[in-house]
Every structure is written in structure tokens, then in C-alpha cells.
Image (cartoon, rainbow, N blue to C red):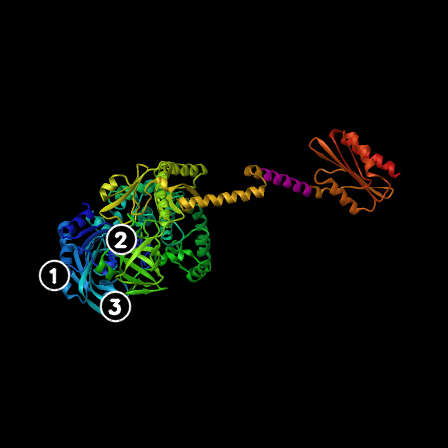
Amino acid sequence: MDIREEFLKFFESKNHTRVASAPLVPDDATLLFNNAGMVPFKSIFTGEVPKPQNPRATSCQTCIRAGGKHNDLENVGHTARHHTFFEMLGNFSFGDYFKEDAIAYAWEFITEVLKLDIDKLWVTVHESDDEAEALWKRHISADRIMRLGDKDNFWAMGDTGPCGPCSEIFYDQGAEHFSGPEDYMGGEGDRFLEIWNLVFMQYEVKEKGGERIPLAKPSIDTGMGLERVVAIKEGALSNYGSSLFMPIIRKVEELIAKEYHYASGASYRVIADHIRTAVFLLSQGVNFSNEGRGYVLRRILRRAVRHGYLLGFREPFMYKLVDTLVAIMGEQYDYLEKKADAVKEQIELEEARFFKTIESGIALFNMELQNTKDIFSGEVAFKLYDTYGFPLDLTEDMLREKGLGLDSETFERLMNEQKSRAKAAWKGSGDDAVHGDFKELLEEFGENEFIGYETIESVSKVLALLDENYKRVERLDMGEKGWVLLDKTPFYAESGGQCGDIGELKCRAKVVDTKKFFGMNLSAIEVTSYLKVDTNVDAIVDISRNEITKHHSATHLLHAVLFDVLGEHISQAGSLVEANRLRFDFSHPKALEHSELAEIEQRVNELVARAIPAKTEVLPIEEAKKSGAKSQFGEKYGDEVRVVSFSDASVEFCGGVHVENTANIGSFIITKESGVSAGVRRIEAVCGKAAYEYFCEQRILLKEVEAEVKNLDVLAGINRLKATIERLKAEVKEAQESAKVEIQAQDINGVAVVVDELPTGDIKEKIDELKNQNEKLCAMLFQVKGEKVLIAAGVKGCDAKAGDWIKKIAPILGGGGGGRPDFAQAGGKDKSKLPEAKAEALAFIEGVLA
């Protein structure tokens, strides 16, 4: 039985709209991940946006609980039912049906579709909820209904907002399997397993600690854990014993060649759970990093690797589990198979990094254990984090196994000193959550019309104005800032990597940005005169839009060329399109070679030169997928999608603005290639006007270099400088070595006489040095340079003449020279006569000084 499909079909039969699972990264800036089935509907429940046309919905939502308030991480693998990644089946009523239908639908599905044994079912209700108890008595005997307090059976979205009692359905797995002290109804044991929670949103709290005010139209939010229901239907006493997990565990068994036993198999279960989380996050575009969601991903993978290390793995293995997971879940989530190759590369790289340090880290941990009685050193825990890449909760896991605590205060102090970037991992995305009068606007006007594909100017009506805090106002005066909602707008709202348009409301306001809020295009404005609601304005998009279109179309061409040049594993991991640059992130395991970048740049420019006309069409989503058009995970696509193509060179889902012909792009220049995270590379490039400006900058730089190297042929000039540098290095080395050579002088009639060979250095400088050291001196130095011999003579404070001396000796070496009485130099061609020359030089000067 495909329980996902049976659930969704059942509620479709009850007039619910099937809603696809939202991305794990939510629109809600206060959350790291979607952690419950109701999160995608939160704005409806809170009243920020109007309820949909059909006030009934059903979904199977992928969820992650691995940080912040909802964090099951430390329990994973050690209990039968906790997971970091799970799927939540849910049915929702937005002010439509309430308790009676919610309870009836749940009972019908459990008993008639799932056909669970009625004798094994139990129900809890809130201690004050007489209505729910009475409704349940229609379906189940009173002795199987239990009343519990707020801790177990009251749900609240937060300190304020919708809230209400809930009713939970439990399945008795049998006393023969579970007989511990907590295995009773309401206990913490696994015998009575909660499978479905029905939340009755019937109150609202306006302020923290305030009273619960009954809602005029209460709502329903339910959540059923798929993994638990699958396990029950398959007769497994643990979620990990079901078909959702056992194939992964069996693959781990195969890789490590050790048999899995439940009692000692926590590490197998951790790995089976964590590979699901890692693969889904990577497939949806989250990458390994040291902050935010990427850090949660990194620590989950490293936790799994550490458990693999405990099993005996000493090299990457997690990536080998990806295909097994795809076989289990790829049919329901087709993007898993499409992204599998890229995901495997990213996981293997991250594993390899951690395996390089894990052994040293564990050795440090074990060494510190010898000095630990109750509390483990915070300094060592920080060193494990900072130097060896051990996330804090991994160290805490290891300590928990030993029954030890951690000096958290010291750890936190050291983290603060380092201004830890990882801190963001526990506080949502770091973005500001936006709240304002959007519901009013939607109810009154609905989504406004974007006409920017056809025109960049229009006469539009101001439907509404918001101040900087998104509160509705009737007027904005000169110098004030706010947001404008036009009935029809030529301004493109930031989306899909493309920046929002700027421009003007002629003679009224500057448009400094455009964003989308709950489907409405709103432009941020700075008022230059005044602006009132119901005014007609001339809306004009800035000329920079032309450059944005060039960069956006070039991004599509780049994506296609990367796919062809580097391989089909290429997957978009993010993009930015602005008027003066583009940035494209993609999955690839290593830095690109210069030759690869040159080919990519050349091929994009060839597509530009081909002058390919753009074609845009709106297609049903399934038809668009079958056409082979590339899509970006996480983008919200409706039943119909806009497809932008440049012949067969590039075909993509895209709601952005583009050139009419690739020739309009002008030229495409790659300015930089770099790494973003493990397995993700980034290319930055410029087109059109920005490309011309980049060319001008490079030309100016080239002229400056020509002037510096004093050569119009820059490479020749650089090579000449390099040769000069090498020669100077050699001379410096010679000078340093010559300084070490000791010259021995002999005394002849009170005159210091030197006749010697100087292997390196400057012989003239050496003679000057000898003169400074002696009152009376006669010195002749020889130095071999290749096949030639250099000669220099110096005289000080005596009757000898250097010129006469050198004229006498140089011919012996086949050369000649001369000079002044105090200094002379010459050169010779026959270095083989050097011993003879030295002997004759000494004899000559002895005769002169006699």
C-alpha cells in the first residue's frame, strides 16, 4: 500500500485540494526549516493572507527537526521513532469544517483505508474538551478515551496567535513487545505510539499571557507521521525496521561487512536517518557551510560519519548510500534522481574532509577523557570544533555516551571571542520576518498585474500605499519612504535570482526596488513630491532593465554551456542577475581549468553571435517538464509555467525578463571563478555595457603595465624583468657568499700584499674593502666568469703602480688592460693559465717592494 497516495486520495475525495510538499527551506524567515505540515499554511492560519478559494487542503510535507525549539537530533538512533527528516501527512480546514468532521475523517481513514485493528486504538483529548470527547464516543468506547492537560493536549503557534486543544490517536503495539515502566497510555514508552494529532484551532491569544479569545471560524490542522504508520502496517516495532529505512541499513551492512542487530545498532540507524536529511537538503539547493542551514547540514553529515567511524569505516561511505535512498523515495520526489550524481560528489568531498581530521580529533578527545571526572574541558571542546571540525553536538553526543557533562560556559566564551558564524544556525535564517497589512490588500485588490514583459512604461493607478513598516497609509509626502501597490505594474519584482526593477513614478517618486509579497508586486519608493491613493501615475522602468535582460539571458546560455562542457552532473545552486554583473553557482567537484573557462566563455559568445531569437510560451506544468526544460528547485510554479528558450541551445522555466535575441547580449566575459562550498563552484561574468566597461578597465590596466615594463610587448617586458630579477638574485647570492670568503694578506716590507682568487662577488668592491682595512696595500684579485677571467689591482700608500702591475700580468691570461696608479682592471681569455698568472703577480710585486 502506498500510504502517501492513499492519504491524499482519501482527502481529495472529501473535497480537499492536494498541495505539493513545500521546500524544506521555508518562506518563514523565523524558521530554519519546514518542521511541520502546517508551516506552508502559517500565513493563512495567522490571518496575514486570505484563505484560499477552497478552504480545505491536504499534503504530504517533508520536514526537518534538527535545530532550535524542535530538535530531535540527540534522540535519533536511540529511540524507535525519532528522526531529523520525516514526512508529515496532513489535512487542513481554513475556517470550514471543525471537530466533528476532522474526527470522523480521521477515524474513517484509519479504520477503513488503513484497516488498523480497532482494539489497538486509543485517543486522548484535552482535559477541558467535552465536545471532542463526546464526538469520539461515536467511534470508540469511552474507556479508550483519555483526558490530558496542556502539556500533552494543547497546541499554540507561539506566545500569540492561533491556538487550541488537540486530540491524539495512539496505536497499542502490544504488552508482549513493550513492558517497561513507561509503557502505559500517557507514558514515555514505545508501546502506545502516537500516530495522528488533530489540532483544533479555536482560540486566539492577542498578547503574551493574554486570555484565549474564541475564533468566529475555527480551523483544523492535523499531522500524521508517515514513518510511524508505514512501520505499523508492515508489522515493524521500530520505524527503522520498515521499508523506508531497512534497505539503507542493509547497504551499510554490505559496505562494512558487519551484521546489524537492533540492540547494538544505533549507529546504523543514525546513518540511515541522516543520509535522508543530507540528500534532501542538498537536492533542494542547501550546501555545506559554516553558518545557518548549511552548518546544520554539515553537522548532521559529520555526526553520521562519526557513527560510521565507530562501525569501522575509515574512508567516505555515505555517498554510496544515495542510490539506495533514491530507489526508495525517487518515485515520489523525482528531483532526487536528477540531482543524485551532484549530491554524491558533494557528500564524498565533505566526508573526505572530515575523515582527514576525525582520527586526530578522537585521539584528543580520548586524551582529555583521562583528565575528566565529571565535566569535560570547554577549551578542548572548542579545539575539537575549531581545529578538527567536530560540531559541538557531536562532542556532546560522545560525552553523553560516557555519562559526562561539558563546561559549556568556557566553550561559549571562546566561541564568542571568535565571533562564531555558526551561531546563526540556531536562530532561523537571519532575515527579518515581514509583517504588515498584506491581508487587507489581498482581500481588497487581489494580486496586481505585471505587464513588464510587454512594456517598461505605463499609466497606472495607485491602489494602496504602505509606510516603511508595511502599514497602510493614504498619503506619502516628500522625503518619506514606503511601498506602492499599482493596479498594473511594469516593475519586475525580485525573483529567481533577478534583482527587482528600479525607476520612477514620474514627478512623484523614485522607485528604488521591487519585491513580491504574497503574490503582490510592490515597489519601494522615495517620494520626491507627494503621492496619494487613487492617483494615476506614469510608471517608468529605469534603462538599467536593458542590461538586466542581457545578464539574465546570458545566465541561461551559461547554464546550458556548463551542462555541455562539464557534464550532466551540473546542477544550478543559485544565481544573481543585476544590471552590471551575473553570478551563477553550480555543483561541480573541483575548480575549473583555465582551458575549461576559455571554452565556456567562447561557446557562450558563439551562441550570442548566432543571433538566436528568444521564444517564450506558457505551458501546463507537466507538458513543460516533458519538454526537457530545466527548472530550479524551490521556485514556486503554478499549474502553468513560463518557458524561455533560445532555439535548442537553452530551454528553462523562467518568469524573468530577457533579450529578444541573443545578439542583444553583445559580449560575455568571465571575470572570476571560485569555490562557494564543498562541491559548489561560482562563475561571475559581465555582459553588454558592463562587458565594455570591463574591457576598458583592462585596456587601461594593460597600458599601465606597458609603461611599467617599458615595452609594448608586455610578455616580452615581463620576461625581461624576470630575467633581470633572476640575475639580481644570483648577484645577491654571490655577494652574500663572497662576504663569507676570507682573504689572507702577507706582509712584505710593511705593505699588506694580497694575490688571490675571489670565487663570487664584486672584485672591485672587495679591493675597496681591503683598502679600508689597510694603511699600505698591494692587492690583485682574479675571478673566473665562464671561460673568461676578470682581474683587478689596487695600490695604497706605497710606490707600486696598479696600472704597471696589471699590464705585466694580463697578457699571461691572453688579455690586456690598464688603469690608474691606485686602481686598474683587465680581462683574460685563458683561465687555464690562472695559477701561472697568480705566481707571476706575486713575484712582480715582491720585486717592486724590495
As shown in the figure, which amino acid type bears the numbered disc 3? Lys
Q: Which amino acid does label 1 sit on?
A: Lys
Task: Specify the principal SS of the magenta part.
Answer: helix
Residue at disc 1, secondary structure: loop
**In magenta stretch: residue 487:** no
Residue on which disc 3 sits: 206
Q: How many labels does the image show?
A: 3
Disc 1 designates what residue? 137
- What residue is disc 2 on? 81
- Mark 1 or 2 closer to N-term? 2
Label placed on residue 14: none
Part of the protein shown in magenta: 719-736
Picture coordinates of residue 766, whole percent (x, y)? 74, 42
Relative placement, left or right, of 799 versus 349 is: right
Q: Do the residues labelled 2 and 3 touch (CB within 8 Å)?
A: no
Q: In which quarter of the image is residue 356?
A: top left
Sequence order check, earlier mark of 1 and 3: 1
Q: Is residue 703 left or right of residue 488?
A: right
Crowding at label 3, few (<14), some or many (≥20) Cα neighbours within 10 Å? some
